[in-house]
Image (cartoon, grey):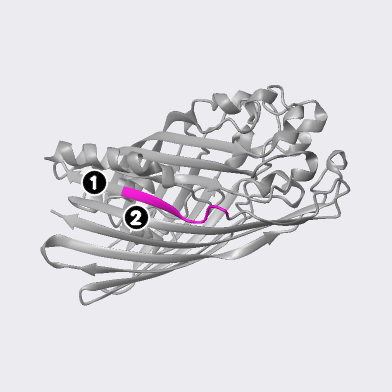
Amino acid sequence: MRIRQLIHAAVLPAILAPGLALATNGYLSHAYGVKAQGLAGTGIALPQDGLAAATNPAGTAFVGNRVDVGLTWFRPNRNAEIGGNGAGLNGNYDGNDTQNFFIPEIGYVQQINPQFAAGVAVYGNGGMNTDYGSNPFRAFGASGSAGVNLEQLFVSPSIAWKLNENHALGLAVNFAYQRFKAEGIQPFAVASQSPGNFTNRGSDSSTGWGFRLGYTGKLTPDLTLGATWASKTWTGKFDKYQGLFAEEGGFDIPASFGVGLAWKATSALTLAADVQRIQYSDVNSVGNQLGNLFTGNAFGSSNGPGFGWKDVTVAKIGVSYDINEWTLRGGYSHATQPIPKDQTLLNILAPGVVQDHLSMGATWNLSKGGELSVAYTHAFKKTVNGSGSIPLAYGGGEANIDLSEDIFGVAYGWKF
């Protein structure tokens, strides 16, 4: 029965994966698990369910035997404006021809013995989608709609070892599946080392792996410290887009690390805070700047242009309060800006600019070990106004991009 549950946990979201498309802290998710969503993603020192290993695998040691199944509705609003361009690109562009995305999650944890717990977490790690029915690059000769679709799914088996009653170490292996498609950016293909593998090639996929380490420990009976580090996830190349992405289609998933604290202020009230760092700049296809093109590095070459993203630091705070059979949650997070003002032209396709999330959520503790959880998050509209963003070779002027999001999740958990 346990093996069957593990198989179902790994396979079901893979079947549903075509709905994935996130763009919160850069293009990674702000939270893993509906309970964590209600805390704006806070959870490095506060494991709550079977998705704990997605944030900190050491937390698997403290959640007991359980299965959690959830679904999140994600609705982004992305737009672009171009002005002062001498090549005819000027205008306002709506990137929302595709509006609704659904992201599944499943977590399973089993206590092997008093010292060891094992589990698997399956979740949407990140992604990005834009769909411009009115192509911003039509004046350059582009045809059809323009946009990209990036989807990333993680299957993360984990094991946690309790050093004693208060301290644990954890390890998760992250198996990744990602899929990508680009459309309507034909004019830029002339600057590629492989123009036939640049755009309108349909969906391509790649797989890869990495790992995450974690620690969770009680410094006092009421204060818990957590720490976690995730390696870069090394993936295969997008062969159909080897003329677009640097390193002939390379698109690894960036490393990240973070620390967190959770303080049980009273028997009912818990306060938590996390700080996380995401290393986007270490992935050439994401971190390289458009200016690389004008120093002899064609699209698709080893040091070819990317989206110019910087590393991101995210600070999160969360509050949890127990009242009768309910647990109420709220949280806020702030991220630094990944997209510089001089890199907004290509990021019309990937406007991951939101920085502030406000969340609320609740869990209803039912009889016989059941739990029903809900969460809502709003990512406030953020606009990055271009400054020196469109090279003179493309007519000059500025590209301004904006994004806001609404996220609603629901999950059911069984404790056994």
Q: In the depicted view, which residue is nearer to us: 177 or 226?
A: 177
Which numbered tag is attached to residue 387? none
Q: In the depicted view, which residue is nearer to us: 193 or 269?
A: 193
Q: How many numbered discs sit on the rendered protein? A: 2
Horizontal relation, residue 140 to residue 65: left or right: right
Q: Position of residue 77 (x, y in %)?
A: 57, 60
Q: Position of residue 269 (x, y in %)?
A: 32, 73
- Quarter of the figure with residue 336: bottom right
Report the residue marked by disc 1. 108
Q: In the depicted view, which residue is nearer to us: 331 or 78?
A: 78
Q: Identity of the amino acid at label 1?
A: Tyr
Q: Residues within 10 Å of mark 2 (few under 14, many from 20)?
A: many
Q: Which residues are magenta?
A: 97-105
For residue 269, above or below residue 163 = below
Report the residue marked by disc 2. 71
* x 66%, y 39%: residue: 184
